[in-house]
Structures are given as structure tokens and as C-alpha cells.
Amino acid sequence: TGPDTTRPTVAVTNPTPNSSVPLGTVVIQGTASDNTGGSGIRDVYTRLDTGAYLIATPTAPGNWTNWSRNYNITATGSHTITARATDNAGNIQWTAAIPFTVT
């Protein structure tokens, strides 16, 4: 087989698009996977609004099937979360910005 040139998949499962969450700590959760026979997921990063990408935490070391990242949100109103997964071959996939409201 040749090199892995297929982008991984990544999704944000919480918060759901256009949902409302309470002010304070918001747990961002999602999933990531690589194609069958791919190189495997190396990491997942998330970004709140236009901030820096911060690494998420996998369910278990090296197991990015499910991941999470906590954000302490101190401003009510509209926000967005974006996730980025990179596989071990360096292929990158981003999610669309997921809008949600903090109340």
C-alpha cells in the first residue's frame, strides 16, 4: 500500500449546533477517526471563537475515538467552536464552526 493521503474525520458532538449552554465551564466533546488502513489519529485541537487552537484530551492515551476539551467561558452570547484532527501521516481535517449560545 502507498502512503496515507486521506484526511481523517473529526466532529464536535457537544455542544450541538445552535444549542444554549450555561455560563461557566463548557465541556466540548467530539469524535475523530482515520480511514481503514490509515496511519491513525495523532491529535485533535479545538478553538473557541478566534482564539488559539488548544489540544483536546483523548478518552485514553492514543485513543482519539472520543475526545474532550474544557473551556471556562465568562461572556454570555454567541460563540463558535472549531476542531482540527491530524493523522500520523500529517493529513489534517477541520470541522465547520459550530455555533452555540452561552446564557
Image (spheres, rainbow, N blue to C red):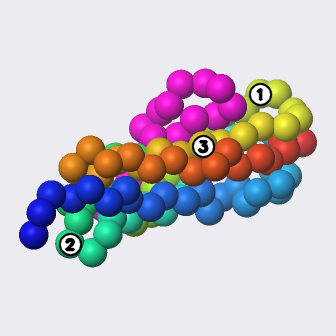
Query: In the image, which disc is placed on residue 82?
Result: 3
**How far apart are the alpha carbons under marks 1 and 3?**
18 Å
**How far apart are the alpha carbons under marks 1 and 2?**
42 Å
Q: Which one is nearer the viewer's eye here, 63 or 94?
A: 94
**Badge 3 amino acid:** Thr
The residue located at (67%, 45%) in the rendering is 97
The residue located at (82%, 28%) in the rendering is 75
The residue located at (70%, 55%) in the rendering is 15
Outermost residue to the bottom: 36
**What residue did someone put label 2 on?**
37
- Of circles 1 and 2, which is in front? 2
Crowding near pointer 3: few (<14 within 10 Å), some, many (20+)? many
**Badge 2 amino acid:** Gly
Q: Which one is nearer the viewer's eye here, 101 or 73?
A: 101
Boundaries of the magenta span: 45-64
Is 62 in the magenta?
Answer: yes
- Of circles 2 and 3, which is in front? 2
**How far apart are the alpha carbons under marks 2 and 3?**
26 Å
Relative to 39, 34 lies left or right = right
Element carrying mark 3: strand
Lower sequence index among marks 1 and 3: 1
